[in-house]
Amino acid sequence: MELSSVPTDAELAAWATQVADDVQRGRLMLVTAESCTGGWIAKALTDLPGSSAWFDAGVVTYSYAAKESLLGVNRSTLERTGAVSRETALEMVSGALVRFDAGVAVAVTGIAGPTGGTPEKPVGTVWIGWQKRGGEARARLFQFAGDREAVRRQTVAAALIGIRETLTG
């Protein structure tokens, strides 16, 4: 899943509509666990009329404490690998499925900028995790370019595309 450009609102809406169709076809509920996108994935999905029939919950967890208490991310994981890591994304997505009545979940954690980057994890570093109930969690690292909005838009798009792949793959 490669994005050729920063997605427009219309493209995000189109991907959200496709996700809605896939989730409903599977008779599932969806949950989002978001950090760097600040709830934008949930917004894109719940902008659709009738989303309450298939969207269960969205959680925005920026702090370590919120990731721990709301999603069950282990403090040792956060201290060892940081919030922006494969391990944290996997624990976020699995924790979302454990805590909510959903059949599929997506989790994002990253550095949208303009500050917060390091040489090891520069601005634009994003981990996204996906999991279908009963399946194995998977996570993927992305390096998005651009300003804060561009990084967040690309993250939302990649998250939505990945939900579709999780459901149809």
Image (spheres, helix red, strand yellow):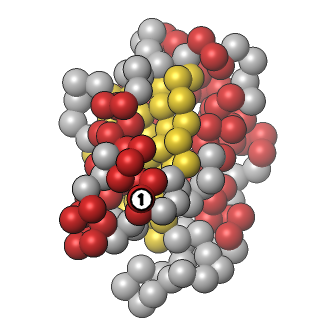
Q: Is residue 49 above or below residue 107?
A: above
Q: Is residue 118 above or below residue 169?
A: below
In the image shown, does 151 or 60 lie closer to the viewer?
Answer: 60
Say which residue appears at 45% left-offset and 54% top-offset. Answer: 66
How packed mark 1 is, by other alpha carbons closer than 10 Å (few <14, some 14-19, many 20 or more), is some
Point out the residue furthest to the bottom here: 119
Residue placed under numbered mark 1 in the picture: 65
Residue 14 visible, this orientation: no
Q: Is residue 119 above or below residue 148?
A: below
Question: What amino acid is at disc 1?
Answer: Ala
Position in image of residue 143 (x %, y %): 47, 70
Say which residue appears at 62% left-offset and 37% top-offset. Answer: 42
Say which residue appears at 59% left-offset and 12% top-offset. Answer: 53
Disc 1, SS? helix
Position in image of residue 32 (x %, y %): 50, 38
Answer left or right for 100 relative to 117: left
Answer left or right for 1 relative to 78: right
Query: The C terminus is located in which quarter?
Result: top left
Say which residue appears at 66% left-offset and 46% top-offset. Answer: 40
